[in-house]
Amino acid sequence: MVSESKLQRINERGWRVGLANLLRKENGEWWGTRAWLVQAVIWLAICNGLLAMILWVAPAQSRQAAEAGRAAEELTGQQAAVDGLEVFLMISAMATAVGIAIIMQDSIMDEKKSGTLAWVLSKPVARPAVIIAKLVANSIGALAIMILLQGAVAFAQLRLAGSDVAPGPFLLALGILGLHLLFYLTLTLMLGVLFDNRGPVIAIPLLLVFGYQILLGIAPGLHQITPYGLVVQAGPDNPALVLLIARGDPVPSLLPIIATIVWIAVFVGVALWRFAREEF
């Protein structure tokens, strides 16, 4: 009887050898402690804290200024909701990209330096299972806390403030934010496999996040073949794709979405290929 045995045989073969145990370990780092609660509070403050300021604090101050007879244009609740939607999407895109790069920079690096990876690989564990476990567990944790939770709270705030944003388009917009996050998650994971120094692992993603104006100025075509097209405004008459989707407006091109998915697949493929040849 399985229930009478202290050890249970796990029938995993090929690239799945050790995957179940590795997933339990990686998921435990997100959900087995209070880390998930700390992360939730941090991201609520970053993403929804600023949205709350726009939706509730700014209109109240505007009304007080108008009542006091000072020269100020009154900010209505509807106007605040429109502005708040755009700010939430843009801040969420930038902040979560930076956040996941910081979280993922040590995912491989620390275990390399401490010898943990060498010890793990001395057990019956397939090398692809190590990368897949980190990819799956971190993706689930990040998407749940940094995208879905923040989106649910933001949607509630926007509707309470009088916004007419629809659930369907808003959920699709959250999907775009999730795709944008996965780009930087897989990029940082790949860099952690390729490099033994923490410098490039964190510097390259941050350069892409904050250097978009320079990069697009040099090569405007990057807007269509990188995640920039998802969250960066291409011009006064060309808002970010995520904002168009959230509003339910027509989308001029799906190429940035397709390109981002391709980039994610490339990053995962390179990480798997290089890790299979890594010496520990």
Image (cartoon, grey):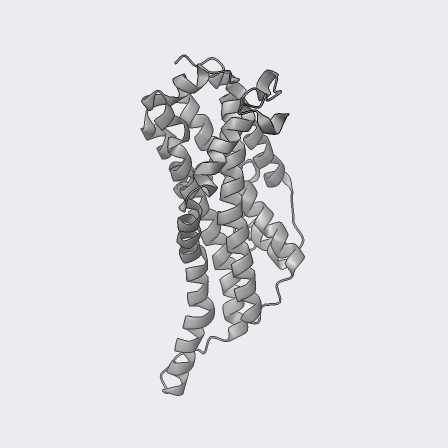
Would you place residue 117 above or below residue 277 in this image? below
User: Residue 109 at what x, y percent from top left?
Assistant: 37, 26
Left/right of residue 225 with respect to residue 207 in the rendered view = right
Left/right of residue 68 with respect to residue 96 in the rendered view = left
In this rendering, does residue 158 appear at all? yes
Would you place residue 51 above or below residue 108 in this image? below
Q: Residue at x 47, y 75 (%)?
A: 75
Q: Quadrant of the C terminus?
A: top left
Q: Residue at x 55, y 72 (%)?
A: 78
Q: Residue at x 37, y 25 (%)?
A: 111
Q: Quadrant of the N terminus?
A: top right
User: Foreground: 279 or 4?
Assistant: 4
Q: How many marks?
A: 0
User: Residue 148 at what x, y percent from top left?
Assistant: 55, 51
Would you place residue 75 above or below residue 216 in this image? below
Q: Quadrant of residue 257?
A: top right
Q: Residue at x 53, y 25 (%)?
A: 6
In this rendering, does residue 232 appear at all? no
User: Foreground: 164 or 27?
Assistant: 27
User: Residue 28 at what x, y percent from top left?
Assistant: 46, 37
User: Foreground: 216 or 280?
Assistant: 280
Would you place residue 225 above or below residue 54 in this image? above
